[in-house]
Image (cartoon, rainbow, N blue to C red):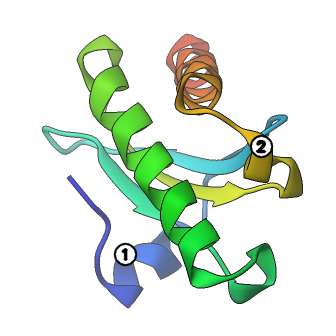
Amino acid sequence: MRLRTRQQYQRMAQKTLKFIGQWILADIRLTPTTSSRLGITVTKRYGPAHRRNRFKRLVREAFRLSYPHFKVNFDIVVRPRTQALHAKMPDIQQELLLFIEGVAKLPL
């Protein structure tokens, strides 16, 4: 359920829907696969390792809890915004669900 290889991340740079929220930035691409996959990108500019790791833990948990609510299969790459330093897991989960609902409503 994760994007792992460089090729998978490079594929996400093309033909994706981009969403900007208060806490996160997301690139979402609909896929014909049987499950949705998550990728997380956090650069050193975000802060020290413990902050980057905390953000990744929050996003993974939000994705795990939101997974049963997804109506479409997609690949998603999540990046933090500066304000994400103060985000709680429910904030990120709510924003993630909002983005996914937006993709599900699009006529593709």
The three-letter amino acid code for the residue at tag 2 is His
Give coordinates of residue 91: x percent, y percent.
65, 25
Residue 71 appearing in the image: no
Q: Secondary structure at mark 1?
A: helix
Q: Which residue is mark 1?
A: 8
Position of residue 30 in the picture relative to residue 83 (left or right): left
Residue for point 36% across, 39% down: 61
Position of residue 73 in the picture relative to residue 17 (left or right): left
Give coordinates of residue 15: x percent, y percent.
61, 58
Q: Which residue is mark 2?
A: 86
The three-letter amino acid code for the residue at tag 1 is Gln
Position of residue 74 in the picture relative to residue 99 (left or right): left
Q: Residue furthest front?
A: 50
Of the two numbered discs 1 and 2 in the rendering, the one whose residue sits closer to the viewer: 2
Residue 56, above or below 45: above
Residue 96 appearing in the image: yes
Number of residues whose C-alpha sits closer than 10 Å to that of mark 2, classed few (under 14), some (14–19) or many (20 or more): few
Residue 71, above or below 108: above
Residue for point 39% across, 88% down: 6
Q: Locate residue 46: give its quadrant.
A: bottom right
